[in-house]
Image (tube, rainbow, N blue to C red):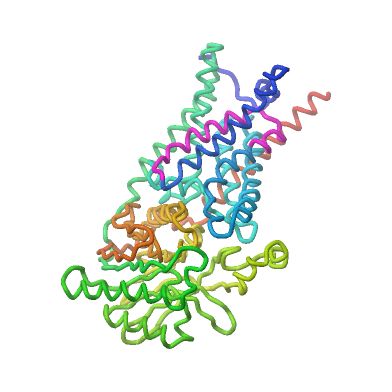
Amino acid sequence: MTVTAPSVDQPDQLQPRPAPGGPAGRLLRLVPAAASALCGVLLYLSFPPRPLWWLALPAFAGFAWVLRGRSWKAALGLGYLFGLGFLLPLLVWTGVEVGPGPWLALVAIEALFVALVGVGVTAVSRLPAWPVWAAAVWIAGEALRARVPFEGFPWGKIAFGQADGVFLPLAAVGGTPVLGFAVVLCGFGLYEAGRLIAERRRTRAVRRGAATAALLSVAVPVAGAVAARALVSDTAEDGTATVAVIQGNVPRAGLGFNAQRRAVLDYHARETHKLAADVRAGKAAKPDYVLWPENSSDIDPFAYPDAADVIEKAAKDIGVPVSVGGVVEKDGKLLNEQILWDPVKGPTQTYDKRQIQPFGEFLPLRSLVGAINKTWTDMAHQDFSRGSEPGVFDIDGTKVGLATCYEAAFDWAVRDTVTHGAQMISVPSNNATFDRSEMTYQQLAMSRIRAVEHSRTVTVPVTSGVSAIILPDGRITQRTGMFVPAYLVQKVPLRTSTTPATELGVLPEIALVLVAVGGIGWAIGSGLRARRAGDA
């Protein structure tokens, strides 16, 4: 093995790849574009409901092959194609009820972030140990995408495709940024290892530093994941609780799921009465509390006594507190609210959803959207308001954290329930709008990641499915089908210890963003120095 000093100015990496002329040459020029889009599709296939998490590795290896040595303009286009290949199929559910326009617009915007990442990856690919810098650039892109525009859209974080993967324990180390970084680093490292093997066969020499960096890029994430398994446990540290999850189903799928007054509420009350009857008959264990999904009361129980009566009868029948998802109007504000309904005292605690969904619960650019399609503004005639306090219900001494539906995609919205004392987490959701699409499985995978990230049991009550109970090690122990009424009852562990991910919060993400910025700065500085030297 020949040893040479690492360099950031290697001609074979900086020069554009030549292509032959004629028709054959034009076809060859299309190969990188086609490969980039196909690698994006491969990344999509690694996401739920398919348990093919490992496909993310060849997807990023192929992405690295496409980008390495390209100009920034080529990298921008290739990155955009990768983003389209990934996000077009991943987010197709956003157009289930409103048509392809919003879906295509969302993907077109989100793919721009991936395009910028492509430019960054190409820039740092000239540095020593480039897979580390490049993986950090990807995480920096995710961090930006999770915050802008309209307060961000973190759907499609690489971590959310790894619920069945060997890297999952890393969620407990540093949350979704560290988990995603490990996967991307390993993918880029596989490409670099393959490239160096090919180089050795061709030249019978390879730089020792580059070979070591490639090996570590693959080995360290895997070894880290194995070591992090010690952080994953489903032991009951603070006793147990018997929890019931209610899935009442809806009259019909789509945006009009709650058009029939009180129908959704009646369905969830009916399933709760069924559970109560089974408890009395000895067919089911009596729960300590019952969790209903988001929007399980389709009319405001504070404004309509008949709705309150339905909830109260269900709570009295089961004899324990029931957490109800309601659409509530207070002081002129429309709120997506969780209400803890005691069988004796009535409503005692509430939590208002804080991270509301753009173009679903509030409409940015309302006048522009109305000019394009008035139907959309008519459907969302009033924006929901945001809550301000973390959601933690104290139910007879047990603290249950609440992250309502869309909030599960945001690191901070789940973490602060645990930092405020939650011993378990519930993610009440309403996916009926998206019919039988993959959306519900993608969101379920997020909850599995959150369970490991914070070492908490996570329950997922959904109006139409899939509802589930997830242990702190990420295992789903019970789940329902879609668009069927059902209940789940299980004794679950309560935990009070915190993982490094919970303690560190946003710090790992900040560190990786700084690594990315440092790498890009180094690459730009080296390029400028090389250009000056060439001019001289």
Q: Is residue 358 above or below residue 38?
A: below
Q: Tell me which corner region of the image, top left, top right, bottom left or bottom right, holds residue 13.
A: top right
What residue do we see at 44% from left, 69% from top? Answer: 294
Q: Which residue is situated farthest in the left direction here?
A: 282
The percent position of residue 519, horizontal first and vertical second, equals 63, 38
Which is more toward the observer, 278 or 188? Answer: 278
What residue do we see at 39% from left, 65% from top? Answer: 426
Q: Is residue 73 above or below residue 261?
A: above
Which is more toward the observer, 364 or 76? Answer: 364
285 to the left or right of 399:
left
Q: Which residues are magenta?
A: 50-78
448 to the left or right of 281:
right
Which is more toward the observer, 268 or 456? Answer: 268
Magenta region's main secondary structure? helix
62 to the left or right of 321:
right
Residue 390 in view of the camera: yes
The percent position of residue 241, horizontal first and vertical second, equals 27, 68
Which is more toward the observer, 144 or 47? Answer: 47
Q: Tell me which corner region of the image, top left, top right, bottom left or bottom right, holds residue 342.
A: bottom left
Q: Is residue 263 above or below residue 94?
A: below
Quarter that holds the C terminus: top right
Magenta segment includes 422: no
The percent position of residue 413, horizontal first and vertical second, equals 49, 63
Disc tally is 0
Magenta segment includes 74: yes
Q: Is residue 240 above or below residue 526?
A: below
